[in-house]
Amino acid sequence: MQVIELNAVITQDHEIHLKLPDDVKASHAKVIVMYENNLKDNTKRLVNKWNKFFASKSVFDDDFLAERDNEIPQEREFY
């Protein structure tokens, strides 16, 4: 099996068109596509969004359950 490296452009239709050298006489080939993934950039952007969210001032007080000791008035009679 022979190996050649070709550069290609991925179209908006997610297609790749390859032009093989004239000396390639095979009728079948295995194509491996290696591409740069922008996932790392997307992950960084999401992490920055979450960091900003957690760094922002909380909408809750330090003790957001401060009212838990205040009993809710009962509208029924206790016997």
Image (tube, grey):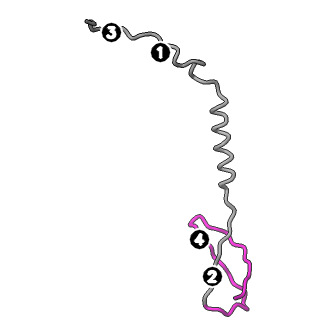
| Residues tagged 2 and 4 counted as in contact (Cβ below 8 A) | no
Q: Nearer the viewer, mark 2 or mark 3?
A: 3
Indicate the amino acid at tag 2. Lys
Q: Which residue is mark 4?
A: 15
Please say if 60 is above or below 40. Answer: above
Query: What residue span does the magenta drawing correspond to?
Result: 1-27
**What kind of residue is marked 4?**
Glu
Residue at mark 1 to residue at mark 4: CA–CA distance: 61 Å
Judged from the image, the secondary structure of the residue bearing numbered disc 2 is loop
Q: Which mark is residue 53?
A: none
Residue 68, numbered circle: 1
Q: Residue furthest bottom?
A: 25
Q: Residues within 10 Å of mark 1 (few under 14, many from 20)?
A: few
Mark 2 vs mark 3, CA separation in Å: 77 Å
Instruction: Indicate which label's residue lies in the foreground, 1 or 4.
Output: 1
Q: Quadrant of residue 3?
A: bottom right
Q: Gap in Å between the C-alphas at discs 2 and 4?
A: 16 Å
In the rendered view, tell whether residue 20 sits above or below residue 15.
below
Residue type at the position of mark 3:
Gln
Residue 73 appears in which quarter of the rendering?
A: top left
Residue identifier under label 2:
30
